[in-house]
Amino acid sequence: MARTTTTQKSGGKIQRQGRRVMPTMRRTKRRAAPANLTLGDLIAAAYDTAAGESLEVLKLVTSPQMERVLGRRIVLVP
């Protein structure tokens, strides 16, 4: 709907069109659900990466980068 306003110079009333908010574009493509990993899968992948070295696995799994990616802190006792 147009709003009626009064101009200061002429004193007459004019109709002014207000801005309409455009809707955001709907996302047609759905984001893929993250893969569900268990702690065992994570430790097995770390062993594969570290070639079976227990201390290297411990460093990989308890690293700050892994904590940031998982959103949880993993504590392993050697």
Image (cartoon, rainbow, N blue to C red):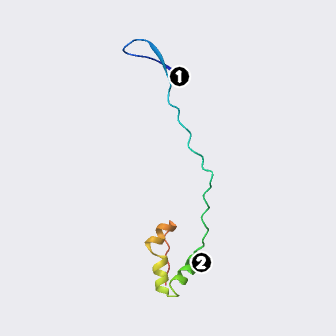
Q: Which residue has dot 2 on it? A: 40
Residue placed most toward the observer, 74 or 6:
6
Amino acid type at image mark 1: Ala
Amino acid type at image mark 2: Gly
Q: Residue furthest top?
A: 11
Residue placed most toward the observer, 35 or 67:
35
**Residue in the picture at 62% in, 62% down:** 33
Across the whole image, how many numbered discs are drawn on residues?
2
- Is label 2 in a helix, a strand or a loop? helix
**Residue in the picture at 48% in, 81% down:** 58
Residue 9, x across and y down, in percent: 36, 14
- State which quadrant residue 12 falls in: top left
Q: Which residue has dot 1 on it? A: 2
Q: Nearer the viewer, mark 2 or mark 1?
A: 1
25 in relation to 36, above or below:
above
Q: How crowded is mark 1: few (under 14 residues within 10 Å), some or many (20 or more)?
A: few
Whether residue 16 sits left or right of residue 44 in the image: it is left
Residue placed most toward the observer, 4 or 56:
4
Residue 61, x across and y down, in percent: 49, 77
Q: Residues within 10 Å of mark 2 (few under 14, many from 20)?
A: few
**Residue in the picture at 47% in, 67% down:** 68
**Residue in the picture at 47% in, 84% down:** 56
- State which quadrant residue 8 falls in: top left
**In what quadrant of the picture does the N terminus appear?**
top right
Q: How far, Cα to Cα, is label 2 from label 1?
A: 64 Å
Residue 2, x across and y down, in percent: 53, 22
